[in-house]
Image (tube, helix red, strand yellow):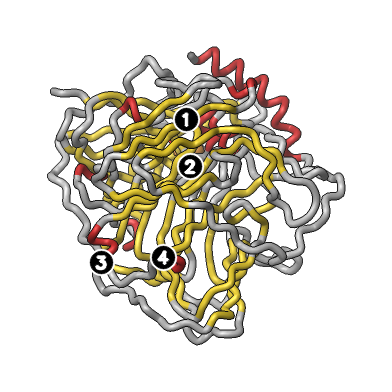
C-alpha cells in the first residue's frame, strides 16, 4: 500500500504546481447579489431514485453553464428529507461518464450498517447500474433523532475530485421532538451548502489536485456565487454545511449580530448558544437561527471572515439576506433543546497521531495516521460492540485537519496543546478550553496544528468495518484514513 501511495504522490505532485498558478484568463467578474439563492428540491419519499450524471449547471450569473457531475442534474443535489426511525430505500443510478468508473455514496453522519455506509472500496456502483441503500435512520440507536447530515461520493483515492465536480447534497432527518419545538419551519427552514471552486474563463471547474488541499477562488452558496435571498423580518432556521474540499469557513454577519446556534453536525444542542463568529471546517454542519426582526428594508451579508480583513482584502461576502418582506413572527427559540446523552466510563483508550510525510524540500507527499498510510486490508482499531472507548487525536503536522468518524456520534471531552517529549513522541500539554458548542455530540472535529482532542462514544448496534479520516478531501485521498471494525466480543 505504501508504495502505491508514494507513486501516486509523486505523479500527482507534478499537477499540484498548477494549483498555485491562478487562471489569469479573464473571466467576467461576478456581480454580487445578482442571482437569487436556490433552494434544492426536497425528496421526501421512502423509496426514491437519484441519477448520477454529467450535466450543464448554470452556476455563474453570466456566461456558459458549468459541466458538473451531479445527482439528478443539479448542484447541490436534491435535499433528501426523511423522518428518523423510518426506513428509507434510496437508489442511485450511476450514469456518469466512463472516466468516473464506479461510485459509492456515503450518507455522512448516518448510523448505518457497513454495507449501507458508502465506503471507499465496497459495494461500488458500476457505471450503468443502480444500487439501493437501505437506511434505518436510527441515529444514536434511537428512533427519535433529528439531524442535518449530507451525502457525497466517497470513492477511494478520488473523493476530492468527485466532490469538487459536484457530487454532494444535504440529507435531513426530522423527528417529533424537533418538529414540536417552536423553531422556524417550512420556507423559514433553509439549507445552505457552501463550497469553493475555481472557475476558468469558460466557467468550467477543472479539478487541480493539491496535496495540501484544493482551494477554490469563488465561494458558492447552494451552487451560486454571492446569491441574494429575500427574507422577512423574522427568524429563520439555517442549516449550514461546509462542503468544500479543504477550505475552513469563519462565518459572521455583516451587522455583527449574533447567530443563535441550535445544533451541530449530530443534532440539537442542549441549549441555544449565541455566537458572532462560527468556524466551520470541511464536512461540519451547524444549525443557527438568524433573526431579521426590526431590519425591514435593510440587507445583511453572511461573510467568511477567515482571512482577517485588511485594506484591499475585505472578508469574503458569501450571500445577502434582503429583509424586504413584512411578516408576522410565528417562531421562537426555546431556552432548552435536547439534553446531551451521557456515556458510561470508557473501558479503553486509543491514540491516533496525525502526521505529514514530507520530501527533502519540506513539501508533504502523504498524510498518515499513526505513521501508516491507509490500507483497506488493515484493521486500525477493533472496539467491541456496546463498549465505550475514548479516542485521542494528536496533530503533529503543520496543517489543520478535520477528523470525521463514521458510524456513531462522539462527545468531545478535552482539547490540549501537543508537545514533543525528549524522544520526539507527542504528549498532552496545556489544556485548551472546550467551548460550550463543542460539548454536544458531533462526528467531525477540527484539529489545529500542534493540538489534540479526546472524544468518547459507545459503539452501538452494528458490527463491522467503518472509516475514520480527515475530511480535507485531498488529505483523505492521500492516505489520511484508517479503518475500525466493531467486533462482537
Ligand atoms: Cu463525509 Cu467518510 O465522509
Ligand atoms: Cu487533513
Q: Position of residue 227 (x, y in %)?
A: 64, 62
For the residues bearing labels 4 and 3, Cβ distance under 8 angstroms: no
For the residues bearing labels 1 and 2, Cβ distance under 8 angstroms: yes
> How many angstroms separate mark 4 from mark 3 (CA)?
13 Å
The verdict on label 2 being within 8 Å of ligand 2 is yes
**Left or right: 341 with respect to 396?**
left
Q: Position of residue 345 (x, y in %)?
A: 13, 44
Q: In the structure shown, which secondary structural element does the residue marked by tag 2 occupy? A: strand
> How many angstroms separate mark 2 from mark 4 (CA)?
35 Å
Tag count? 4
The verdict on label 1 being within 8 Å of ligand 2 is yes
> How many angstroms separate mark 1 from mark 3 (CA)?
41 Å
- Residue 8, compared with residue 107, is above or below; it is above
**Left or right: 414 with respect to 99?**
left
The residue carrying mark 3 is 180
Question: Of 384 and 65, which appears nearest the observer?
Answer: 65
> How many angstroms separate mark 1 from mark 4 (CA)?
39 Å
- Residue 19, compared with residue 184, is above or below; it is above
Instruction: Single out the mark in the foreground, 1 or 4.
Output: 4
Question: Of 407 and 365, which appears nearest the observer?
Answer: 407
The residue carrying mark 4 is 186
The residue carrying mark 2 is 401
Q: In the structure shown, which secondary structural element does the residue marked by tag 3 occupy? A: helix
Q: Which comes before the other along the chain, label 2 or label 4?
A: 4
Please report the residue visible at 43 percent of the width from the left and 75 percent of the height from the top: 235
- Label 2 neighbourhood size at 10 Å, few (<14), some (14-19), many (20+)? many
Please report the residue visible at 40 percent of the width from the left and 70 percent of the height from the top: 260
- Label 4 neighbourhood size at 10 Å, few (<14), some (14-19), many (20+)? few
Where, quadrant-wise, is the C terminus in this rendering?
top left
Residue 315 shows up from this direction: yes
Amino acid at each position: 500500500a505504501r508504495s502505491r501511495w508514494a507513486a501516486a504522490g509523486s505523479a500527482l505532485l507534478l499537477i499540484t504546481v498548477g494549483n498555485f498558478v491562478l487562471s489569469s484568463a479573464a473571466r467576467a467578474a461576478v456581480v454580487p447579489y445578482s442571482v437569487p439563492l436556490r433552494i434544492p428540491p426536497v425528496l421526501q419519499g421512502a423509496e426514491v431514485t437519484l441519477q448520477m450524471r454529467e450535466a450543464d449547471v448554470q452556476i455563474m450569473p453570466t456566461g456558459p453553464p458549468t459541466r458538473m457531475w451531479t445527482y439528478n442534474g443539479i448542484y447541490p443535489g436534491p435535499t433528501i428529507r426523511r423522518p428518523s426511525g423510518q426506513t428509507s430505500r434510496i437508489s442511485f443510478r450511476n450514469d456518469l461518464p466512463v472516466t468516473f468508473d464506479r461510485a459509492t455514496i456515503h450518507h455522512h453522519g448516518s448510523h448505518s450498517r457497513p454495507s449501507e455506509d458508502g465506503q471507499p472500496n465496497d459495494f461500488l456502483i458500476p457505471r450503468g447500474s443502480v444500487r439501493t441503500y437501505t437506511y434505518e435512520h436510527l441515529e444514536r440507536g434511537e428512533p427519535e433523532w433529528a439531524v442535518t447530515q449530507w451525502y457525497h461520493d466517497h470513492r477511494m483515492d478520488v473523493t476530492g475530485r468527485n466532490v469538487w465536480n459536484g457530487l454532494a447534497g444535504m440529507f435531513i432527518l426530522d423527528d417529533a421532538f424537533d418538529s414540536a419545538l417552536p423553531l422556524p419551519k417550512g420556507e423559514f427552514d433553509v439549507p445552505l451548502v457552501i463550497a469553493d471552486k475555481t472557475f476558468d474563463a469558460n466557467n468550467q471547474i477543472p479539478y487541480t489536485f493539491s496535496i495540501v488541499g484544493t482551494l477554490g477562488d469563488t465561494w458558492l452558496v447552494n451552487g451560486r456565487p454571492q446569491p441574494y435571498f429575500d427574507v422577512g423580518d423574522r427568524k429563520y432556521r439555517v442549516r449550514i454545511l461546509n462542503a468544500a474540499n479543504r477550505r475552513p469557513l469563519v462565518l459572521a454577519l455583516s451587522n455583527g449580530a449574533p447567530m443563535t446556534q441550535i445544533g451541530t453536525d449530530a443534532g440539537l444542542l442542549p441549549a441555544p448558544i449565541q455566537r458572532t463568529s462560527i468556524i466551520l471546517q470541511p464536512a461540519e454542519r451547524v444549525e443557527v437561527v438568524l433573526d431579521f426582526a426590526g431590519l425591514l428594508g435593510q440587507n445583511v451579508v453572511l461573510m467568511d471572515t477567515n482571512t482577517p480583513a485588511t485594506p484591499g482584502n475585505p472578508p469574503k461576502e458569501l450571500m445577502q439576506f434582503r429583509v424586504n418582506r413584512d411578516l408576522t413572527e410565528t417562531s421562537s427559540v426555546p431556552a432548552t433543546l435536547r439534553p446531551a446523552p451521557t456515556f458510561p466510563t470508557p473501558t479503553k483508550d486509543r491514540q491516533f497521531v496525525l502526521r505529514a510525510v514530507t520530501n527533502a524540500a519540506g513539501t508533504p507527499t502523504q498524510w498518515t495516521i499513526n505513521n501508516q498510510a491507509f490500507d483497506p486490508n488493515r484493521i486500525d482499531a477493533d472496539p467491541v460492540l456496546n463498549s465505550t472507548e475514548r479516542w485521542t487525536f494528536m496533530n503533529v503536522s503543520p496543517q489543520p485537519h478535520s477528523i470525521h468518524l463514521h458510524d456513531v456520534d462522539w462527545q468531545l471531552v478535552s482539547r490540549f496543546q501537543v508537545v514533543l517529549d525528549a524522544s520526539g513522541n507527542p504528549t498532552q500539554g496545556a489544556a485548551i478550553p472546550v467551548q460550550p458548542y463543542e460539548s454536544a455530540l458531533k462526528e467531525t472535529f477540527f484539529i489545529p496544528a500542534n493540538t489534540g482532542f479526546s472524544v468518547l462514544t459507545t459503539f452501538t448496534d452494528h458490527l463491522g468495518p467503518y472509516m475514520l479520516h480527515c475530511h480535507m478531501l485531498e488529505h483523505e485521498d492521500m492516505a489520511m484514513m484508517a479503518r475500525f471494525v466493531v467486533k462482537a466480543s
